[in-house]
Amino acid sequence: MPFEAPELTIEERVEQLNHSYRHHAAIPILTHALNDPMVGRVAMVSSFGAESVVLLHMISLINPDTPVLFIDTQMLFQETLDYQTEVAQKLGLTDVRTIRADAAQVKKRDPFARLHLADTASCCNLRKTEPLSNALNDFDAWITGRKRFQAGTRTALDLFEAEENKRLKINPLAHWRREDLQDYIINNRLPRHPLVDQGYPSIGCSPTTCTSKVAAGEDPRSGRWRGSDKVECGIHFSDGGATRTGDQA
């Protein structure tokens, strides 16, 4: 059954959760969130991208049966698909759910798989935002990998957020720095996405209009939708507009 707390709005729950967990580290936050009745049913959303293995490893330590939603746009790098399989097996994740767009909608709106060339926003909406929204209908909260360092608009990112009036977002790594992520991966001997060493610090779909290599000194996200004003796939919004964020957890 969905979480029911008629005496508390989502905003009120968010305020209480942020107050309760404000001094907690990432793993305790996840541990509590996965068991707190105020949070409800939780899923993790992961792109199995460059930094995703950090949260995936934490989840595997706490509860490897936690649902992990992996959005397969059917335009991903083969390396990402292989990495998803490798990481899930290595960490013992037992409930990785591959989410894809409705086949009939893809046939109708992108029959030649070229929509990304003309309208990247519509392509992301079709292949990412809509499928994820449908998949999240079964949950009261979802775990993301967003962090404050990723953009100026994220400098005040909280551990818990309200997603409109639907559900909670949990950001366990909100206070982490880029160096913290790399240290965690190294110290725990976690497998790295093979494309990172090939010049892709941020990894999305494979077409060059959506993901390209990043030169030394460039912002790690500069290879996403290069040459366009687009900075985000649409899964996350702030004040009604898309904002630049790093890889999903």
Image (spheres, helix red, strand yellow):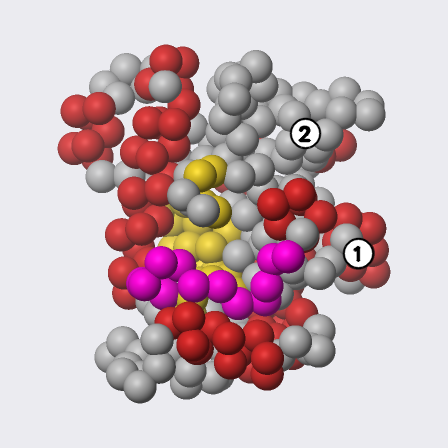
Provide the secondary structure element on which disc 1 rests.
helix
At a point 47% along the width and 55% down the height, the residue shown is 45
Q: Which of 81 and 178 lies nearest the eye of the viewer?
A: 178
Q: Amino acid at mark 2?
A: Tyr
215 sits to left or right of 226: right
Q: In front of the other: label 2 or label 1? A: 1
If you read the primary sequence from the N terminus, does the residue marked by circle 2 or circle 1 appear first? Answer: 1
Place of residue 85 in the rendered image (x, y in percent of width and height, measured from the top left) = 52, 48
Q: Which residue is mark 2?
A: 200
150 sits to left or right of 97: right
Q: Which residues are magenta?
A: 156-167
Q: Amino acid at mark 1?
A: Asp
138 sits to left or right of 13: left
At a point 71% along the width and 73% down the height, the residue shown is 25
Q: Which of 30 and 112 lies nearest the eye of the viewer?
A: 30
Rendered view: 91 above or below 239 = below
Q: Quadrant of the N terminus?
A: bottom left
Q: Which residue is mark 1?
A: 180
Q: Which of 131 and 227 lies nearest the eye of the viewer?
A: 227
Rendered view: 179 above or below 14 = above
Question: Residues under labels 2 and 1: Cα distance?
Answer: 19 Å
At a point 71% along the width and 78% down the height, the residue shown is 23
Q: Which mark is residue 239?
A: none
Place of residue 54 in the rendered image (x, y in percent of width and height, measured from the top left) = 67, 57
Provide the secondary structure element on which disc 2 rests.
loop
